[in-house]
Amino acid sequence: MKRLILFLLLEISPCLQAVNNLRLPGIRCLGMGECGVTQSFLFNPAVINRLDDKSIDINYFNRYGLKELGTVGMALAYPNKLLSLGVDISSFGYDQYRESRFRLSLGKQLDERWSLGLGIHYSILQTVLMNKQPQYLSTDIGILFSPVEKLLIGMLIMDCPSVPIQKSDIDIEDFTGYSLQIGFQWEVINSMLIVAHVETNKRTVLTGSAGVEYRLYNHFYVRAGVKATPLLPTFGVGYNFLCFTADVAALYHPVLGISTGIGLKYSF
């Protein structure tokens, strides 16, 4: 069974990479269609400037009920007026096939409306079927702009440029690919947030997603969204208790089934 899964991982790795195995936007964002451009510093490093508190995040996302297709991530965010800092580590796969990434995020608030961010990544692929372990360095560049109160616009260039440190003896060109994303978030009322983004990348000319978050009670949130190409609905809930935030989300594929995620954040 594991050999079959390993074979499928290598065969469909380009397709899996199209959804980026290692880049979890946070379970909250996942419930809103995975719109991370204006929501998560794990996608856009400029977002770290807009965080109110320092935080530690732990996220786990499981694809289609297979533990071998699980991604786990840990992140530390340290917003600061001088220079904001974020560090996170993510890992996808299992002992015979694993993709891993270490990321350093830096952010700077230019003024009340503009902020910039830079992410630097080190990625490695480890598998028993390769003699070498491919390694890459890549960067993210993010921008946030707030033209009016409660409206935020973001732009993100992901994994560009990408520089190989050590190449493999087989073609893994799709292990890291570029992506250009533009998105927004609009707090319509105090209890409702609308988010959306469009994207172009190496494999898709144009795709996108949209979502909404509604606060039912003071500390309880419900979320829903949809991703395009293919059309995948998402939904989730979140609950705040003192310094802790717990989020649960799910994504439904009409053929492969349900993928689920859970996240826990501690703010201080």
Image: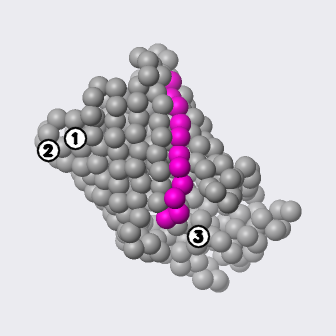
Q: What residue type is disc 2 on? A: Pro
For the C terminus, the quadrant is top left
Distance between the Cα atoms at labels 3 and 1?
34 Å
Measured as percent of width and height from the top left, residue 62 is found at 66, 48
Label 1: state its secondary structure. Answer: strand
Q: How many marks?
A: 3
**Label 3 sits on residue:** 15
Measured as percent of width and height from the top left, residue 153 is found at 24, 49
Q: Are marks 3 and 1 in contact (CB under 8 Å)?
A: no
Using a 10 Å C-alpha cutoff, classify the residue at mark 2 as few (fewer than 14 neighbours), some (14 to 19) or many (20 or more).
Answer: few
Query: Residue 151: which numbered mark, if any?
Result: 1
For the N terminus, the quadrant is bottom right
Q: What residue type is disc 1 on? A: Leu
Distance between the Cα atoms at labels 1 and 2?
7 Å
Query: Residue 147: which numbered mark, if any?
Result: 2
Of residues 27 and 236, the one nearer the viewer is 236
